[in-house]
Amino acid sequence: MSACIPTRATDPHRKKRSHQPHSPPPLPPRRFRVAGADVSAAIAVFLIALPLSLGIALATGAPLQAGLVAAAVGGLVAGRLGGCPLQVSGPAAGLTVVTADLIHLYGWRTTCAITALAGVAQLGLGCLRVARSALAVSPAVVHGMLAGIGITIAVAQLHIVLGGTPQSSVLANVRALPAQLAGLHPAAVCTSVLTLFLLLAWPRVPGRAGRLMRKVPAALVAVAGATAVASLAGLRLDRVELPSWSSHSLSGLPEGPVLGIAAAVLTTTLVCSVQSLLGAVAVDKLVATRPGLGARVGRSDLNRELLGQGAANIVSGVLGGLPVAGVAVRSSANVNAGAVSRNSTMLHGVLVVIAALLMVPALELIPLASLAALVMAVGIQMVSLNHIRTVTRHREVLVYAVTTLGVVLLGVLEGVGLGVAVAVAVALHRLTRTRITHDEKEGVHHVHVRGQLTFLAVPRLSRALHLIPQGSPAVVELDGSFMDHAAYEALHDWQKSHTDQGGSVELTGRRPGIRIAEPGDTADCRCRPWTPWRNHQCDAPGAEPATGSATVSADRGEHQLVRGISAFQRNTAPLVRDELARLAREGQRPTQLFLTCADSRLVTSMITSSGPGDLFVVRNVGNLVPLPGEESGDDSVAAAIEYAVDVLKVRSITVCGHSGCGAMQALLTSDPDAPPTPLRRWLRHGRPSLERMADDGRPWARLSARQPADAVEQLCLTNVVQQLEHLRANEAVARALDAGALELHGMYFHVGEAQAYLLDGQEREDAVFGHVAGSEEAHSLA
């Protein structure tokens, strides 16, 4: 036996190395890096956020430092923890009215406590994962809420613009406006007018200079310009006052009635959450417009965003800041400035902290009238004409108007409650308001249903249907987008009974683009979405078609054709009518000529994912292109090619063969001595393909994935290559090829595999058909 000698690997007394000799050295610690795009975006957002934060704090009546605290916390906390990396949070104009009311009712310290409690409520909603449900609120209610808040802000700030002091409500501000106009403060008015002028004119400077100037935010230019002019002119104005941070008020315990505090927390939570979530959705849309950024940033996690906003409101409330929410203006500026990660949002918060600590002397030069003009402009912009047009188009202007007036006259929570109630009432009214009429035209009875067809309308529908005499033709026009199960059964039962008694029924939808929602599980139809491309039958299960009679077969084919046309008129025509009307007006402008076989299994629109107007299609037996001068008086294929190239100016021609081609089978098995028939005379144009395949000096066309299955498939592939050579002999094609205005492509479609192959190397002898697995290989057909 050999002695066991301890080695380096087994010696227990040997010290262990930190890593194995042949293992890679440990990676150095990863350094934190901030992209240059994030730095520039953070600076741009900071320059916008600084004056707006001070202006919103002024509008609410809170200490001006509260706006800076909220901006810093929104950038650092919500930016780090939120689910929308590029959304910028901070004091929002949409919260101005709510916060001003709370300060007026409960004082500043209790308002801070309410902000913190609203943050706790947001954390709870985020944990319950209900963020998506907040998006179910009607957009008309949201836009109406923002418009009402904007009107309230604008009317209140108008008093400061004129040199006065705003009142506690909109009505009080309106009543005090005549007296305020009578006692104008010229210096305040001039400063405000200058601010508004710079704010509106700065983005509209034309030319190259304007493009360079627009890199500086208009809000910063307006406030800085007005401040500089007021300082140089020595105007006596009320200016920003930032007391020492040592005397800054923090949150205190909430003091007031429990129900009042609870309602305040609910209102703050609602407005903060809805505005932040809608802002996150808007940021996702902006991100989608920047190529490559969507994959890097990803879609917003709305529940995480709610958690981040809740944490930010807790911190802001405890530190004596305003309520925090996602802000559309700053978020859009962040995306447009080129931000690529949440670092830009956080860095903007750091810049706000630095400004609050080091720029106090400069900030105290800003006139309050300038900040008021800036906030008033923001309030006016919240009443969006685009939103008004949208709600009018969707017939929800009543919801918008009620919400706006409710917010202006009663408050945010009350106005939103009224708006939601009206939205529900409008939805119920639309659902239950159904107009059903019956008339007769030229012996055909028409029943017209306008509106949604629900169980509430079934009695009236039944009365109208029973006015139609037995055995007479009837047309039921459904002008709506919804039909519930009770209405469907009533209509279906009547239709079956009426047709059994010898009558005919046609169901149509008159509004383009609308399909009637019907239950999908029916006993008499086994169709699936792809079966319009298939020779299917919707007979009752178990019913065997009659056989042995040519008359029965003809009737059955005619019945199938009529049924297919009827299905098109009912289901497909409303969807394509607008597009076909446009094509009828403008004429056809296809980009491709697609020459393929007449085989019924080749559905060109299906295998190329094309629609009306996309392809100019030529079909014949065997996808043949006769050589010039060899058609014996039949110039149909050459005429189509000439028309496509010279008149339609197509940019590509594709010759498409397919597996199991009957023409190629007939060509292989043809007897040269057989009497000529029209089919045999036509197939003579395929004999060059036979000769090409029989030529030992030429390599066979082949598939890249596998060898051709048999001689028929080999001839199908060879025929595509040969017909491309015939195409090049065409005078119009040759001329377009020489000019570089045309491309030729070969294609092979395997019917049984539902797989397309594109010809690679058709200019060479060794033509190879490559498997099309994705869009990169299929681009030549696009």
Image (cartoon, rainbow, N blue to C red):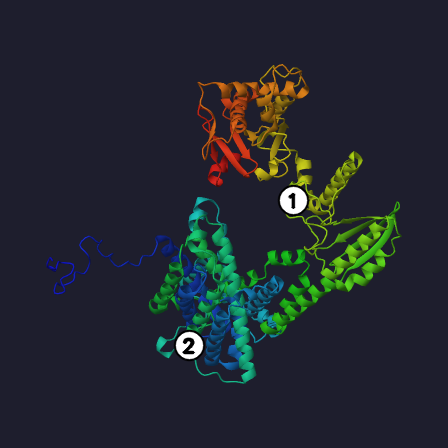
Identify the residue shown where x is 61% and y is 23%.
642
Indicate the secondary structure of the residue bearing disc 1. helix
Location of residue 719 with respect to 156 vertically, above or below = above
Q: Position of residue 228 (x, y in %)?
A: 41, 61
User: Residue tagged by mark 2?
Assistant: 318
Residue 247, quarter of picture: bottom left
Q: Does residue 706 appear anywhere in the picture?
A: yes
Q: In 3D space, how far apart are the residues under numbered discs 2 and 1 (Cα atoms)? A: 64 Å
**Dot label at residue 531:** 1
Whether residues under marks 2 and 1 lie with C-beta atoms below 8 angstroms apart, the answer is no
Crowding at dot 2, Cα within 10 Å, few <14 / some 14-19 / many 20+, comes out as many
Foreground residue among 175 and 770? 770
Task: Provide residue 25's location: percent of width, then percent of height.
Answer: 21, 55
Q: Amino acid at mark 2?
A: Val
Quadrant of image for the N terminus: bottom left
Label 2 SS: helix
Residue mark closest to the camera, 2 vs 1? 1
- 6 with respect to 72 (left or right): left
Q: Which residue type carries mark 1?
A: Thr
Q: In the rendered view, tell whether residue 339 sits above or below residue 773.
A: below
Residue 50: mark? none
Residue 335 percent across, percent down from the top left: 45, 55
Which sits in the foreground, 487 or 512?
487
